[in-house]
Image (cartoon, helix red, strand yellow):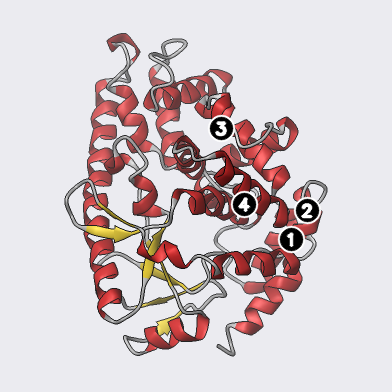
């Protein structure tokens, strides 16, 4: 990647989150096209459009690209409005059925942003309390259930947005760490009564606490890092999580949980990326940044894009299960030295999860 393009791209991110006022130079028309491509690959088109409006006039992209960027941002805002309405409806439906749920990631995390409508949204992830059997049996009373996984299942939800219903919020490959993780989740009863009014007036949704998100959002990133890959949108989510702050006792509990689940190296890597890309202030750091692990993390992010969709090292067209497993092994070999206690359990745990879903 051209050094200028990378510099301008990171400059634009900092302008978008109000950490800079301008770019360090004036990109050419061709450079602007590549910057826009990067914004799409990292799913931060809307966030960076807000940056364009703040730039000095001479630093803005050519008008045709500016209009294209504006149109893409309008689509993001319209989609957010629909997903907000669907998230509200899903919370209402499940509560009326006598169950409690929270919206993971997505529309809840968006409320941490200065302008939630600019965050590029995806599916609705709901965590329903009660455990795997209870939740999946509930879904089966509603419609056919398909794609049952260790963490979630999909069904024909009464909304237009795709819904993933979680019976476990997430997982780890290492069985000892997974047991500790599940024990933590089982103790989160208060989460299911934490609610907010959405800023667009669509209604109320239930979301996790900031302390829960301080752990969960980074753990979700960690899981996808070893799966298909992650993009900068996920790290930007975490940037806004840590900006929410918290008491020292709360942060100590989070760091102890990271320690108990073998994630301290990755936390250091994330802190390094948050400082380099988003100019995070020292007072918000959870630990000392880990430069070596952070550089590897950022390199993977820039190569792979959002959830690894642009990783040219992987043949995305081959859906064969054996081929997919081979790709996971091939991808994760480069992480073994940094995260051996997690990576070495990947294949055994994937095998267990594959068997598990056929008996639930």
Quadrant in the picture for residue 158: bottom left
Q: Quadrant of the C terminus?
A: bottom right
Nearer the viewer's eye, disc 4 or disc 2? 4
Which residue is at the front of the view, 144 or 63? 144
Q: CA distance from mark 1 to mark 4?
A: 16 Å
* Residue matched to label 4: 222
N-term-proximal mark, 1 vs 4 = 4
Nearer the viewer's eye, disc 1 or disc 4? 4
| Element type at mark 1 | helix
Q: CA distance from mark 4 to mark 2?
A: 16 Å
Against 99, is 30 above or below? above
* Residue matched to label 3: 274
Residue drawn at 46 percent across, 35 percent down: 243
Give the percent coordinates (x, y) of residue 271: 61, 35
Nearer the viewer's eye, disc 3 or disc 2? 3
Could you tell me if residue 304 is visible in this image? no
Query: Disc 1, disc 2: CB below 8 Å?
Result: yes
Which residue is at the front of the view, 244 or 278? 244
């Amino acid at each position: 990647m051209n050094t200028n393009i990378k510099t301008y791209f990171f400059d634009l991110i900092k302008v978008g989150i109000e950490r800079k006022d301008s770019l360090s130079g004036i990109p050419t028309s061709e450079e602007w096209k590549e910057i826009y491509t990067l914004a799409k690959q990292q799913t931060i088109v809307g966030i960076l459009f807000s940056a364009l409006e703040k730039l000095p006039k001479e630093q803005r992209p050519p008008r045709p690209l500016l209009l294209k960027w504006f149109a893409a941002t309008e689509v993001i805002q319209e989609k957010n409005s629909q997903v907000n309405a669907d998230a509200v409806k899903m919370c209402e439906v499940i509560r009326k059925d006598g169950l409690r749920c929270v919206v993971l990631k997505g529309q809840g995390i968006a409320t941490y942003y200065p302008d939630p409508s600019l965050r590029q949204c995806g599916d609705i992830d709901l965590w329903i309390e009660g455990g795997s059997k209870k939740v999946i049996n509930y879904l089966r009373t509603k419609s056919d259930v398909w794609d049952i996984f260790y963490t979630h299942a999909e069904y024909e939800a009464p909304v237009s947005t795709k819904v993933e219903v979680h019976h476990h919020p997430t997982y780890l490959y290492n069985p000892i760490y997974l047991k500790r993780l599940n024990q933590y989740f089982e103790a989160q009863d208060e989460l299911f009564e934490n609610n907010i009014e959405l800023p667009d007036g669509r209604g109320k949704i239930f979301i996790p606490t900031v302390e829960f998100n301080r752990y969960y959002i980074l753990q979700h990133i960690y899981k996808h890092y070893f799966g298909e890959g992650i993009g900068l949108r996920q790290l930007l989510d975490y940037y806004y999580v840590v900006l929410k702050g918290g008491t020292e006792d709360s942060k100590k509990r989070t760091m102890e949980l990271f320690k108990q689940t073998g994630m301290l190296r990755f936390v250091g890597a994330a802190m390094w990326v948050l400082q380099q890309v988003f100019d995070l202030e020292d007072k918000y750091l959870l630990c000392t940044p880990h430069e070596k692990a952070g550089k590897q993390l950022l390199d993977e992010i820039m190569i792979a894009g959002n959830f690894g969709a642009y990783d040219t090292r992987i043949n995305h067209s081959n859906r064969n299960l054996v081929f997919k497993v081979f790709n996971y092994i091939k991808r994760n070999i480069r992480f073994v030295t940094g995260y051996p206690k997690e990576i070495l359990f990947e294949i055994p745990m994937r095998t267990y999860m594959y068997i598990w879903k056929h008996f639930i």
